[in-house]
Structure formats: structure tokens, C-alpha cells
Amino acid sequence: MSKEDRLEKAAERTALNLKECEQRYLALFNQARDGIVLIDAASGYIVDCNPEYEKLTGRKLKQLKNLRIWELRPPEKIEAARKLFLEVKQRGKGGSRELEYQQPGGKIVPIDFLTSKVVIGDDEYFQGIVRDISEQKKVEKSIQVSRRFLEIANRHTQMAKLLGEFVSEIKNLTGCAAVGLRILDKEGKIPYQSYTGFSKEFYELENPLSIKSDQCMCVNVIKGKADSRLSFYTKGGSFYMNATTRFLATVSKEEKGTTRNVCNQFGYETVAVVPIRLGGHILGLIHIADPREDMVPLETVSTLEYIGMQLGDALHRVQVGEELAQYHNRLEEMVKERTGQLTETNRRLKREIKERQEAESALKKSEERYRILFTSGKDAIFAHHPTPDNLPGKFFEVNDVACKMLGYTRKEMYGLSPMDIVAWDKAGLTPKEAMKNLASSGQALIESAFIAKDGRQIPVEVNIHLFELQGQPTVLTVARDITERKKAEEKLRRGELKIRELATAYVRAQEEERQWTALEIHDRIIQPLSAIYQHMQSIQSLVPGSPPTRKALNRSLALIKSTIRETRQVTHDLYPTTLARYGLVRLINDELSQLEKQAGCQTKLSVHGRLQAPQEVETALFRVFHEALLNIRKHANAGNVTVALNSQDGFIELQVLDDGNGFDMTAKTIDKVPGGLESMRRRTEILGGTFIMSSRPGKGTKLNCSIPVAKESK
């Protein structure tokens, strides 16, 4: 075979290998579970994308090619996105950011956008890897809503302020035009105790609603007659409808029952009625209305049902507190009144005998009224006098609820004191300390536990007041059994733990997918390209000395070599294999050595404690360190970089300190600080850790990342 024939055969094999490599890349490109987009670095126009990216943007490739990358953002963010693109273009390197796309129908899709620069031939492009993070955002929002309403429920002691803030927060949560809270009174009426958005005419028509004489959806819900087999009732006993006009026109009378249709008459298409619960009792309703359709999905109704339970517990607490304050004030007035009567008796004994008898009769009636209040409450009530050495004395009065709660008879209770029934280890202080604190403040609200006669520990919320009764210091204690609330809090804690476990699984899955992608790129792209490069080198030695031919071969070899190098860097960024092979300390030490060679700065690594952590924790720590190091390379101009790894008390702490340029932490553009600040914080917090960064211009930057490694008990 002649030399020319061998060259022709070699060229054919090269072309075939290139075609096979292209087909493998195209298959990987089209089957990727993340959106992939190729952007012209000069103009910002979209050049190519995979089907998943079309799905994320709601547009076909043909439409996308007519758009620049920033034109996919919501209108109000397009200009800022354009400037961001120019900044990335100027730096020549991308990174990971959380952004939003707006689809043609108006739907907003939150995404994580990871960009990197690639060179194809003589042209520069940006490659974007895009992931839909809608579900992650929903989980974060659910946790925030739960915590916000729990804070409101525990903050207020006045009914009007409590209900007003609940109304305001529910309106913010749902986005509905009108929100009202109806509370059931002793006469069976359910008036609005707080509302916003309802017209005066609507309020006057709806406010007198009574469960005794009226029939409607509100009455069905508050009576607990919501049939969850019907589509417009939930298992939690709520009514919701996102199109009342269609509901009234299409649902049979047998299913919907008797209804007043007032909300629909006033133009409200979306209506929801959610019970406010305290244990097995319904205290009132959360009423939501809006003239637009589809404003309250089932997911929002479920959230409101949980809020209704929080509000029910808060309502009961505030009501008891207000009644207790009224009882206290009236008791003080009685003592003053009686003291005045006795003084007057000493001066005018004969004249005041009759008045004294009348006063004693009135006092007896008053005491009887308060005795009824004392014995008929749902909370346990205790009264005792402090001892001379300022310790809790024996009870001189208890109600039936207290006896029933602890399992003692009233006679047995009179032989006991708080020293005998309080689990002081749960109270967090000694009896002496408790009396001292009470003497200084006059009242206290604490959580503790009572020890029943049979040894059971009952979690309670204790409201304590110190006052004088007939000139003697008296302690009045109102205790509420919070067993159910503790169960609810435990359920919430387990829910948050489950969310954290899901978040950890999400991080693990993300890293596994990065590993899979990196391996696929290595096996299907880098290895074939390396074979092509070696083959081209062998061809080079066979090519005659024609300058144009050798020049073309040299350019091809340089292009293939550059592509191999860039692709290897992409796989390293996606998944550093040395982390699993050599561990976190070895990988950090290698990165610091490279920094010394590239930037000429001095580095130091210190390790304290035994570093044993799950893979996802080591991965998160490495990615935070890697982001910090990128920031130091690009912006810090540092002379010294110190890194410390500490393992202590179930946490691993990463500290990165440099003496570089630093930046202004108080600036309004802090969310745009280089180095992936939000990405580092999100990676840390999603694993239950804390992330703190401090910096000042000219004073360097300090980063602390602490992540727990001890497993929580389930």
C-alpha cells in the first residue's frame, strides 16, 4: 500500500472516530436530566440547547435561537441579567447562581444556573447547566411559614394584637383580597373578631351569623359536619372552592346542601373556610375570599389547617391569661375594699354594724362567683403562701382540675406543696431560684412537668402570679396540660428532621449525578479524543513536508489537546474523584499547594480532632472551600491564606482566612459578592450547619462553615 493510500485510510478512520464521538456526545446531551444550553459569548444569543432546557423555558430551540440569554428572565430583571452577563463575559468565568425563568404563559420557574466557558474552534461560548429547584423552594417556604406563625402565636398576650397579626400574615401567605377570623361565642354566634378586605356591606350582612339559626358552609365547618368524601371538603374539616360560580351551577343540591351564597353574590370566586381547633374542639374559623379564581390550592388549605391549630392554642392561652388578670385585679380591689370597711368600723362601730353585715354578704356573693370561676376552668389552679425562708409552702386551695390531673384527692393536695409535684429538673431552676425570680418580677410563664401520684410526668405550661391576699404574699399558679402541644411540636420536629434528611438525600443525589456525568464525559468523550490525538500524532509523522498541510495538522492537534484539557477541567469541577479516594484533608492540601504555585502566596493548613464524616458532609465542606479558594484567586490578592479543620462536639468546622483586599459586608450588593456566597451558605444550611463570613475592605476575609456529623435520634 502506498503512502498516500495509508494517509487516506488514516483520515477515514479519524473521521469515523470523530463522528462516533459526536454521536455519543449528542446522545448524552439530549438525554441529560438537567437543561444544557450553549450561548454565544460575544452576543449572548442562544446557539443550541437540549430538550430538557426547552422544557424549562417553555420554548422550542427555533424560538430560543432568536433570544439572548437574559431575555428569558422576568421583564423587571432583564436589564440586571444583561449586566450580569457582561460581568461574567469580562471575567471569562462563570459560576453557580439561583435565578428565575419566565415561561411564555407567565409561569415563573426558579432554577440553579451553572455556567462555564468553552472554546470551539476559534469561537468562545458559555455552557450553562440548568436545574429546576421549584420543589426545593416549596420546602423552604413551608418551613418559613410554620416558624413565622409559631412565633406570632407565642409572642402575643393580647387578643386583638394576636388576631390582627394572624390576619395580616394569612393575607400575605395566600395573596387573597380578604381575610377574616370568626370566633364562636357563648350564644352560638360567630362574629368577625378581626378582618381585612371585606366591604362594610359584606361585614354587616355576615357578622351576625349564628350556628343555631343559619345554614351555610361556615356553619357546616364549625359544627364539624364537613364530609371529606365531597371534593370541596378536606380531611381536616375545611371547605374550599376556587370557582364559586361554577360550583353553584354544577354541584347538586344534595351534595352542597343549604347555602346562603353571600360570598358569590359579592363577587368572590375563591372561598376557603378553615376551622380553628383546640384539641377536639372548634373555636372559630379562618375565612378567606378573593374575586379571582384558583387562589387557594389544596396545599395552601393544608397549611392553613395547621395554622388553625396554632391559633386555637394561642387563643386559649390568651383567654385564660386575660381572665386570670381580671381575677387578680378584682381580688386586689376586694382586699382594699374590705380593709377600708374594717377601718371605718373601728371609728363608727355602731353605725357600721349593719354596713359591715351587708359588706360581708356582698363579699360572700362575690367570692362565690369567683369560686365558680376557680372550679369551672379547664386549667389546673393552685394557691399557696411562701414560707418564711422564701420556699413554696403547702397548697391552701386547688381546683378539681388540679386533683384530676395529678390523681390526688383535695385533702391529699392540701398536704403537698410545689416542692412535691414539680419536676424541678424540667423547670431548669431550683425552688429557691424560682421564688427569688417571682419576687423580683411578680409573675412568670414557664414550661415544666408535674409528677402525678402514679409517677407519670405531665408536661405543663405554668402561669404564676405573686400578689398580696389579706396582707400576706400569695402565689397563684395556673397550669395547662400541654401534652398534645408537645406531641404536635415533636411531630413538627420530626417533620423538620425529615425535610433535612430529604435535603441531605437531595445533595447526595446531586453529587452522584455529578459523578455519573463526569464519568460519562470521561469514558465517552475524553478517551476517544485522546485516541484521536495519538492517532493524529502518528499521521503527522507520515505527512509530507507541505507547509499548509502540516500547519493544518498542527492546528487540529492543538484544538484536540485544548478540548481534552477543558473537558478534563469540567469533569474535575463536576466531581473531584480524589475526594473519595484520598479524603478531604489530602485534597485541600493539594489545592493549597497549587495556589502557592499559581498565586505566589503562603498557605497553612491545620487539622484538629478526628475527621470522620458522611460523604455528603465532606463534599459540602470541600465545595465551600473550593468556592472560597476561587474567590481568593480572582479577587483577594492575598499574601497569606490559612485553613483550619476542627472536629469537636459532633461538628466539623472549616475556617478559611486570608489577608487580601476584603470587601464591604454592609453594601446593598452583598448578594452579588464574588465567590458564590449564597451557594456556600445554602450548601451549609441544607445539611443543618451554620455559615458565617466577615470581611472589611483592606482587612482580608474570614469564613467559618460548621456542619453537624452526629446523627439525630428519630
Image: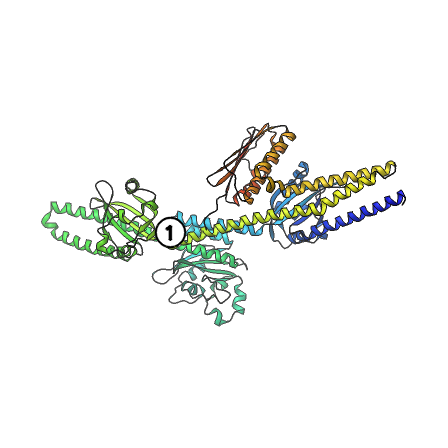
236 lies above or below 701? below
User: Among all residues in the image, which is located at the extreme left?
Assistant: 350
Residue 601 placement, left or right of 528: left
The residue closer to the viewer here, 447 or 301, is 447
The crowding category of the residue bearing disc 1, from other C-alpha atoms within 10 Å (few below 14, some 14 to 19, many at least 20), is some
Answer yes or no: is residue 22 visible: yes
Q: Using the image as rendered, state which of residue 262 and residue 9 is in the foreground.
A: 9
Left or right, 448 with reference to 395: right
Q: Which residue is drawn at 37% across and 49% down?
A: 158
How many numbered marks have been drawn onto this rendered protein structure? 1
- Residue 263 image position (x, y, % from top left): 48, 62
Image location (x, y in percent) of residue 11: 83, 45
Residue at left offset 54%, top offset 31%: 696
Q: Whole-percent x and y of residue 58?
A: 66, 54
> Of helix, strand and loop, which one carries label 1?
helix
Extreme-front residue of the structure: 1
Q: What residue type is labelled 1?
A: Met
418 sits to left or right of 550: left
Pointer 1 residue? 159
Q: In this view, does 146 lie to the left or right of 6?
A: left
**Rendered image coloring scheme:** rainbow
- Is 141 placed above or below 282 here? above
Q: Which of 75 and 614 is in front in this view?
A: 614
Residue 319 vs 656, above or below: the answer is below
Quadrant for the N terminus, please: top right
Is 178 in front, or is 8?
8
Q: Can residue 576 be seen in this view?
A: no
The location of residue 413, given as percent across then percent down, is 24, 53
